[in-house]
Amino acid sequence: MNAPTPEETEQAAGQAALGARAADAVGAAREPFIVAEGLVKRYPGVLALDHADAMIVPGAIVGLLGKNGAGKSTLIKILAGVVQPDEGTLRIDGEPVRLHGPLDATRRGLAFVHQELTDVPNMTVAENIELGLGYPKLGGAFVDGRALRRKAAESLGLLQAPIDPGAKVSQLSIAERRLVLIARGLATSARLLVLDEPTASLTDEEISHLHAVLRLLRDRGVAIVYVTHRLQEVFDVTDDVAVMRDGRMVFEAPTRQVTRAELITHITGHKEMVTAKRWRPPAGERDELLRVERLTRRGAVDDVSFSVRSGDLLGIAGLVGAGRTELARLIFGADRASFGNVLVEGRPVRLRGPRDAMRAGIVLLPEDRRYQGAVHTFSVRKNITLPILDRLRAAPPLPVPSAAAERRAARTLIERLQIATPSPEAPIGTLSGGNQQKVVLAKWLESGASIFIFDEPTHGIDVGAKEEVYRLMIDLAAAGKAVIFISSEFPELVAICNRVVVMREGRLVGEVEGDAITEAALIEHCYAV
Amino acid sequence: MSVDAPAAQPAARRSALWHDLAVNVVSRLGVVLAFGLMFLAFTLARPHTFPTVENMKSILTTAAPQMIVALGLTVVLVMRDFDLSIGSMVGLADGAAMAMMSYHHVAWGWALALALALGVGAGLVNGFLVAVLGGNSFIMTLAMATILTGIEYAFTSQSTIFSGAAPGYVEIASTKSLGLSNQVWIALGIGAVLWVLLDATESGRFMYAIGGNPEAARLSGIRTRTLRVAGFVVVGLTAAVVGILISSAGGGYTPNPGQYLLLPAYAGAFLGAACFRPGEFNIPGTVVGVVFLGTIQTGLTLLNLQTYLVNLVQGAILVVAVLLSLAARRRG
């Protein structure tokens, strides 16, 4: 994470306004804030960090890139004091330090906004922001609510975030909750702010506001590490980029000196990246596999009808909150519809629960892998075989799974999806995010389903894994299945879907097909009044 | 993250291997090791009375009712549900069976069937309240405990029953087979059945999945409600068996006879969760946990300690045993 030297920045000032401002803000004081050298971290069967170096300089936004499992999270956990490196040194302001836990990191001015929302939803915004700082007291014992809200309002003011400090966090949008978490970081007078995938599930407008806030903080001299899988954001907001691969820092440069293609090369480690092409179903009559008629759930999905044919790769576009996930859950029987029908191959299906949907051949890859996809206490094998256990019996009439058959099934799928795991028996929690996602995906592939719903399957996974997920969906469509692909990232819908429908405020508001699918067309439907 | 281990440093890797192995053994077998040490200590302190076959048999017989309740409890705990009504279900089965035989002169087979049916019925109601209506299992089963004790008193008018148990009924608990009390055999039989259920069958796998992530389990097509209800029915059934055994062994009924079982049963199951598969409730663990507790109880009694000391030592041993395996797991 080598920031440009002052000289470089000055030279580039004419071309790059961002870099120039960054340099101005901190003047000549460009002493590195944090220097990490030769960090090594081993986990059972995995070398997470392999002599990684990093340097963090105040007043600059560094984009930290890398595939899932490249070592980004481990590096961040070391900075946060959550894990200790096995080897290597960490210096803060030139002093060698050992961080003893998250509190120690906070005291030294390091603040973290994790990918998962780590707030306390049933507390107020102010209580969340000041959490762990010691609330202002009245008479030594009671929390001074007014002072608390005032202090929180100051932090929020820095972010120019119009959020009521007295509001319950559970009532905020995801974007607002992220801002609250950033405010929590600022409340500790942080000198370093690390954001891990901060824009996941944010709208473009919210993202640009967040970026404006980050630039503001950068100009005040805060060092910012910005972890993301979205290359566009790297070019939008960062001053420098750093790429990790296989536990090492493999590339560092000022952002304006690199191209997208270069970054991808460094991230994936190979020159050419195969890009999935738009799926074109074979010509001729194709059977209708799924028909949804006037499906309605009050407050979420409003009178939605559409149909999907065998070989369709249907995208569902829309903004967060448009009702796409809710629609998927209705079709899968995870929630009850208040009105409407779901027909599979022309026959209405009675959906009392996901089990009924599965029997009818519908499966869902849920949006939230952490809470809905994986059983964290289980191994990779047990997660993969969960929905197909009754087909892996040792002596078929007896409901006793055969360990050998399970291992075979797991191995096959691990190989097919190229899941990086030391063994099928590894706990799923020890895998990287992208590989966990593949496990959650794998469990449906042998289920014999004919209708696959993928809800944000590429959320938070690396470029290489995304390509694999696209390929998988195309393969399913090519095999005559009906595939529904929900995504907030329109470029990926545009790239591979043969049809896309757009949802807005619970309704289906548009449909585009074939070459008419462009990002512009989708955006128009999303925002049109 | 399938990064190859560095080629160098084989010595470091070997020492890490030993470390892993040690951590593994302590975290899995910490409770068993503690059990062994305690056994040794009691043997040294009371070499003539403690390590005898008779004493071992007596420990097992005393522990049998707790074991049966704890085994049933393990099934719901696997799914992260609690059942606090077990003591009351034991009392209901006990009271109903004795009242039927003593007051209404019903044939003992029918009394026994009624007791079992009441256990199953109570389990169904618990399951319905918790898994179907979505009540908090802690509160719901606590409320049910009160209701069930009320029903028990409706059968028995809350008065002690001294006689009326049919000879055949009394034989259930007091007969011995192969030198061990029937109670022990019944406990082991139930343990074997539930062990197979949880560790070898699809339903067992699904129950563990529900405990790990109920929403993921439901979205994988698992009948989460049915299985949770089934768990409560298993608890009801095991509690009824214990109620029958208590009244059969004693040949009578005292009001609210099951209450003393609640804490030891939970303690046994939680101790078991620190054993073999750290952090997960499991049947072999529960068996070890309950026998461990029973041994402490008997051993301390043989030492003629004052009651308050027995309480202190018993509690302390429990805490240390659980912390031991917890610490090992954290370091791993």
Image: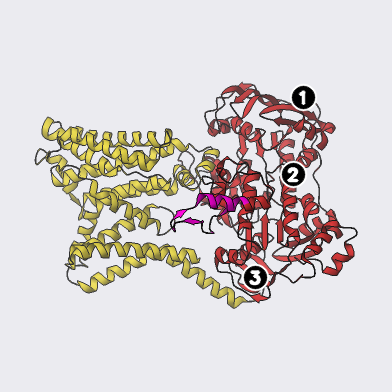
Chain colours: A red, B yellow
- Residue B24 - label: none
Amino acid at pointer 2: Arg
Mark 1 vs mark 2: tell me if same chain.
Answer: yes
The percent coordinates of residue B12 (x first, y second) are 58, 76
- Residue A471 - label: 2
Q: Residues within 10 Å of mark 3 (few under 14, many from 20)?
A: many
Q: Is residue A150 magenta?
A: yes
Q: Is residue A361 left or right of residue B310?
A: right
Amino acid at pointer 1: Glu
Question: How many numbered discs sit on the rendered protein?
Answer: 3
Work out whether residue B31 or residue B266 is closer to the camera in this orientation and state it: B266
Tell me the quadrant of the picture where the N terminus of chain B can be found.
Answer: bottom right
Amino acid at pointer 3: Val
The percent coordinates of residue A349 (x first, y second) are 58, 24
Pointer 3 or 2: first along the chain:
3
Tag 2 secondary structure: helix
The residues colored magenta run: A129-153
Q: Mark 3 lies on which chain?
A: A
Q: How crowded is mark 2: few (under 14 residues within 10 Å), some or many (20 or more)?
A: some
Toward which corner of the image does residue A39 lie, by quadrant?
bottom right
Foreground tag (3 vs 2)? 3
- Residue A285 - label: 1
Instruction: Write the residue at 89% across / 65% down.
Output: A11
Q: Which residue is identified by label 3?
A: A40
Q: Is residue A72 left or right of residue B75?
A: right
